[in-house]
Image (tube, rainbow, N blue to C red):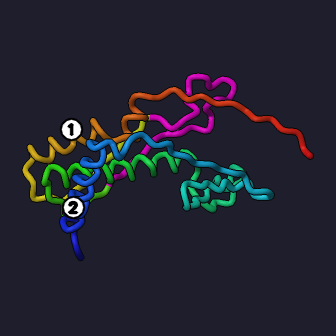
Amino acid sequence: MTNLNEYLGQKREALLNRRKRVKSGELGAVTLNASASAEGRSGVRRIRIRDFQVISDSPPDFAGYNLGPSSPELLLGALSSCLTHTYLIHASDQGVPLESLHAEVSASIDPRGGAEGHDDIPVYPHDINYVVTLVSSASAEEIARLQATVEKLCPILNLLKRGNEVHGRVDHQRPA
């Protein structure tokens, strides 16, 4: 079984190239887009991001067919992916060798949230915890520096820790 160290060399090369493009002004802010539509008869949500599709569904006890993860589960998946990727980026940047890397994320969600008499229970995933397990020959100090960098720069982690303004509107249309 191969480890991540060969990939970290590729990641470092891509990171240095990206930094050069940012510094030259070639790269700047981009708008990210995602959309979801509810499918008739099943209520399954088809999420589209770039050229990719992901199915989101509810468990059977909430009128779902269990055809995909729920939205809160996708959020935790996004955090675990972002943590893993951010560790890869900064391990490559800091020269920290990695044999393996795994991020496990958990949270609580309570179906009573928002129900009458349960105003104190959040309607969103809360008590979010993560554990990153990595195998590395690096020193404890190098791993601590890597962890501090990841906690400072992981986009989804920082969004969840700091929050963000979200603006929305409804485009109400009548049937044809």
x%, y% of residue 119? 61, 23
Residue at the (24%, 65%) spot, across then down: 7
Occupied quadrant, residue 5: bottom left
Does residue 91 lie above or below 159 as drawn?
below
Residue at the (14%, 59%) spot, across then down: 97
Mark 2–mark 1 Cα distance, whole angstroms, equals 19 Å
Amino acid tagged 2 = Leu
Mark 1 nearby-residue class (10 Å; few <14, some 14–19, many ≥20)? few
Closer mark to the observer between disc 2 and disc 1:
2
> In this view, which residue lies farthest toward the bottom?
1
Q: Main secondary structure of the magenta part?
A: loop
Secondary structure at badge 2 equals: helix
Position of 74 with respect to 101 (left or right) is right
The magenta stretch is 103-126
Occupied quadrant, residue 68: bottom right
Q: Nearer the viewer, residue 122 or 92?
A: 92
Residue that mark 2 sits on: 8
x%, y% of residue 130? 34, 45
The N terminus lies in quadrant: bottom left
The answer to if 117 sits in the magenta stretch is yes
Q: Is residue 89 visible?
A: yes
Occupied quadrant, residue 39: bottom right
Residue that mark 1 sits on: 148
x%, y% of residue 103? 33, 53
x%, y% of residue 176? 92, 46
Position of 84 with respect to 76 (left or right) is left
Q: Is residue 88 visible?
A: no
Residue at the (57%, 48%) spot, across then down: 34
